Amino acid sequence: MTVRKILVAPDKRLKIRSNEIELVNDEIRTLLDDMLDTMYSDDGIGLAAIQIGVPKRAIVIDIHEPEETQRPLKIINPEILWLSNERRICEEGCLSFPNYFAEIERATEITISYINETGETTELDANGTLAVCLQHEIDHLNGRLFVDHLTLVKRNIIMRKLAKAKRSSKGTP
C-alpha cells in the first residue's frame, strides 16, 4: 500500500467530475487500499479518488472511533437513491482544505447503491456521521466541494486564504 499526495484547494482538478469505473480489478482494489492508507495517514474519515488526482468514481470511508477497530468502507460508483427531507447542520472539514471547517446543511439520512471491491452491487442506508460523510465524498465525485455549500462571501474568504498559503509555501509573494 502507498500513501499518496492529497490535492489541496484551489487545485482545479478537485472540480473535475469523476468517471465511472467499468471493471473492478486488482488496479482498482490497489487504488482503494492506497486511498485508505492516505486517509488514515491524515486522520481523515473519508476520501474520494479525485482528491489524490485520480478522476474515478471511488471513495473510502471509515468513521470508527479512536478506541475502536477500523471499519473501512470501499465504495465504487456510488449513486444516491434517496435523501431524507430532514436536514441537520454539521461542522465539516476536508483533507483538501487542511485546517478549514464550516457548518454545512445535509440530509440526516441517505440510501446509496454502489459496487463493492468484489464487484457486487449493494445498497447502504446511512444516518448520522456516515450519511454526512457519504454526501461529502459523493459531492467530490461530482466536482463539488464542501465550500460550494457556503455563501459566496464565506467561500471566497476560505479560497483566498488557501491560495495565499499555497503561494507562501512556494516562496511566491
Image (tube, rainbow, N blue to C red):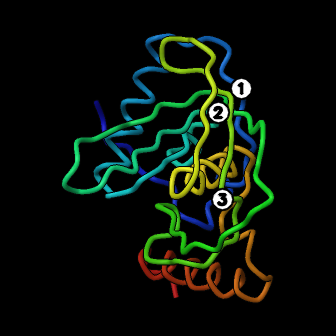
Q: What amino acid is at disc 3?
A: Thr
Instruction: Give the labeled residue for mark 1.
Output: 20
Q: Gap in Å between the C-alphas at discs 3 and 2?
A: 23 Å
Provide the secondary structure element on which disc 1 rests.
Answer: loop
Q: Quadrant location of residue 145?
A: bottom right
Instruction: Give the labeled residue for mark 2.
Output: 57
Q: Residues within 10 Å of mark 3 (few under 14, many from 20)?
A: many
The spot of residue 137 in percent (x, y) is 60, 49
> Relative to the observer, which residue lies in front, 135 or 5?
135
- Left or right, 51 with reference to 30: right
First in sequence: mark 2 vs mark 1: 1
Pointer 3 with pointer 1, Cβ within 8 A = no
Q: Reply above or below: 70 against 156.
A: above
Q: What amino acid is at disc 1?
A: Glu
Q: Residues within 10 Å of mark 1 (few under 14, many from 20)?
A: some
**Residue at horizontal 39%, vertical 56%?**
44
Provide the secondary structure element on which disc 3 rests.
Answer: loop
First in sequence: mark 3 vs mark 2: 2
Q: Residues within 10 Å of mark 2 (few under 14, many from 20)?
A: many
First in sequence: mark 3 vs mark 1: 1
Instruction: Give the labeled residue for mark 3.
Output: 108
Pointer 2 with pointer 1, Cβ within 8 A = yes
